[in-house]
Image: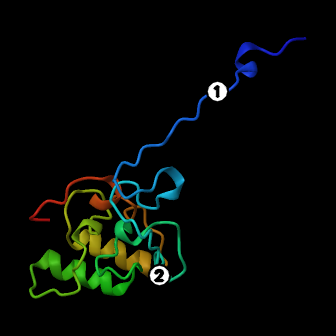
Amino acid sequence: MRAPAFARLRLTETVALADLDGDGRTGFDDNCPQIANPDQLDSGGVATNTPDGIGDACQCGDVTGNGVVNGQDANAIKRHGLGQQPNPLFAVPGNCDVTGNGICNGQGANAVKRAALGDATPSFGQRCHNAIGAAVPPNL
C-alpha cells in the first residue's frame, strides 16, 4: 500500500521567519515578537522573578519596568487612571492595558492586583499594546 500524496511530501526549502520588530531575533527566539528588545531580558512574570518566557519589554501589567508584575504595578496603574501625578513608577505605558479595552484605568489596576495576589482572573492577559504590536497612544 502506497502512502497518500500528502504523506510523501518532502520539504526542500527552509522558510525564514520574519523579524517583525527589527531586533535581530526571529520566531521562537524572540520573547517579544511585536516590540524590539535585542537583549531578550526576561526578569520574571506575574508575582515571580522566575523567567516566564515573556520578555520584560512586553510583560503586560509590568508598568514599573522591573520585569515582574506585582502590587507596585497595580498601584502605579491606579494612580495613572486617577490622573495622580507625579507617578514615577509608571515607566512603561505600553505594558498597561492588561484587559484589552485600549485604556489604562482602574479596571486594569484591579486585574493586575488580583493576578499578583494569585487570583486567576479572565480579565488579565497579554493584551497590552507592547504585546500585540499596537502603537501606544499618547493619552493612554
Q: For residue 128, say whether it is visible.
A: no
Residue at (39% x, 61% y) in the render:
126
| Left or right: 44 in relation to 111 | right
Q: Is residue 1 above or below residue 46?
A: above
Please tell me the numbered disc located at residue 12.
1
- Marks 1/2: CA distance? 45 Å
Look at the image and tell me in which quarter the C terminus lies. Answer: bottom left
Q: Position of residue 102 (x, y in %)?
A: 21, 57
Marks 1 & 2, CB-CB < 8 Å contact: no
Q: Position of residue 17 (x, y in %)?
A: 48, 43
| Left or right: 78 in relation to 46 | left
Q: Quadrant of residue 70?
A: bottom left
Residue at (27% x, 64% y) in the render:
97
Residue type at the position of mark 2: Ala
Of marks 1 and 2, the one in the foreground: 1
Residues packed near mark 2 inside 10 Å, few (<14), some (14 to 19) or many (20 plus): some
Please tell me the numbered disc located at residue 47.
2
Look at the image and tell me in which quarter the N terminus lies. Answer: top right
Residue at (47% x, 74% y) in the render:
42
Residue type at the position of mark 1: Thr
Q: Is residue 74 above or below residue 127?
A: below
| Left or right: 77 in relation to 66 | left
The residue lying toward the viewer, choosing from 109 and 5, is 5
Earlier residue among tags 1 and 2: 1
Q: Is residue 93 above or below residue 123?
A: below
